[in-house]
Amino acid sequence: MPTPTPSRRRSPLGPRLGAASLITVCLILLSSVGAGAAQPPGSHPQDTLQHQLDDLVRTPGGPPGAIAVLRDDRGSRVVRAGVANLATGRRPEPGDHMRIASAAKAFSGAVALSLVDRRYLRLDDTLRERLPRLPRAWGAVTLRQLLSHTSGLPDYAQAPAFLRTLQANPRHRFDSRRLLDYVADRPLLFRPGSRYQYSNSDNIAVALMAEAATGVRYERLLDELVYRPLRLVRTSLPQGYRMPVPYLHGYDVSPPAAPEDVSEVLSMSGVWASGGIISTPLDMTRFVRGYAGGRLYGPRVVREQRRWIPGAASEPAGPGRNDGGLAIFRYTTRCGVVLGHTGNTLGYTQLIAATPDGRRSLTFSVTTQINEAMKPDLLRKMRAVQENFVCALLRHRR
């Protein structure tokens, strides 16, 4: 259906109707809970989840801290290991702030798909139609392809000029809405829709399309279309490098050197809609339950979101077999299926997942960067632990 003309459209914000080298590597790869019932999710007389999380923290090169929140209709369980701050020894808490890294891509997906539901955007809208200032060679790329990482857009986070600026000053204040300028002289990497390739540029373009369609800044769209409906009270998209307190301190862990606190090294203006959001385990639990459960838009959009690309993985890969949808991934474990997103950035690695009905969820956060390129063995171990947490979540069905 055609997009309504601006003069007759209802507001899109209303309720829905019907270190330098280390920093370079990290940017390239950027990619309080209520008391539970008598038997909260994941509990067992001979429970091993705590032991597994403790073991992950003790692994050489492992995170100084980790926290997981398992939730179902009966209540929540928090499993934590290590510390939130090596300097003080404070334990991780569900209300601690953290960088969610590429899990922020699910938020740009939530905004875009909410606008599709309201008919401000169409999945077949192109960059040529919505963002004509971008290179003509990119014009045929659609919103659907951006959300599924099949666009072919070159990744601005790998552009030499971007990396030189970042290396010179990691806290440089970028113009977030001009990040794609760093690759504007480059052609598409492949024909749009012909293959899958994870790119930070995709979600910058998604946010810009949302702004172009509504005339509303992306930060406000996040607030009105995502934060408020899902009651996310400690989630934000800052431009600077400061962390709100209290927060989980993120660390570079590279033995034999002592862990280095890198929580406030990078300006979030350089990742913006692709990875700049700060949230908490509690808020992320609320988010993924609503997002995976399709609460932000209707069944027509949910069906489109869940057209899976076999083998398309998030970065880093989530537990089990990974398949990609529109700003969401399907993780097929030995115990069943959950939907969600992962992320990794300097000091943090994230997994958020929930059952397709949103009734059971897992938020799994660690305080160092773990991915295939930097720590492949640790990633395999973490994914195995994550799968065990998913199994604990899914086994306790009514």
Image (cartoon, rainbow, N blue to C red):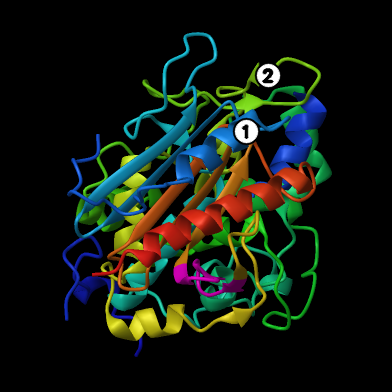
Is the stretch drawn in magenta largely helix, strand or loop? strand
333 is within the stretch colored magenta: yes
Report the disc number at residue 57.
none
Left or right of 375, for residue 82: left
Coordinates of residue 212 in the picture (x, y in percent):
43, 63
**Residue for point 34% across, 35% down:** 94
CA–CA distance between discs 2 and 1?
9 Å
Q: Nearer the viewer, residue 187 or 279?
A: 279
Give the position of the N terminus as an image quadrant: bottom left
Mark 2 touches mark 1? (CB < 8 Å)? yes
The answer to which image quadrant residue 299 occupies is bottom left
Q: Residues within 10 Å of mark 2 (few under 14, many from 20)?
A: some
Which of the two residues, 233 or 270, is positioned nearer the viewer here? Answer: 233
Q: Is residue 16 above or below residue 281?
A: below
Q: Does residue 330 belong to the magenta stretch?
A: yes
- Which residue is situated farthest in the front direction here? 45
Image x and y of residue 192, in percent: 69, 79
Q: Is residue 276 above or below residue 89?
A: below
Residue 47 visible in the picture: yes
Give the left or right position of residue 188, taking residue 113 as reference: right
* Residue 134 rendering spot, x and y as whole percentages: 64, 63
Residue range in magenta is: 322-338
- Say which residue label 2 marks: 259
| In the image, residue 99 above or below residue 105 | above
N-terminal of the pair, mark 2 or mark 1, is 2
Q: Nearer the viewer, residue 160 or 68?
A: 68
Instruction: Tell me what residue is drawn at x 50 percent, y 66 percent.
Output: 327
Can you tell which mark lies on residue 368? 1
* Local secondary structure at mark 1: loop
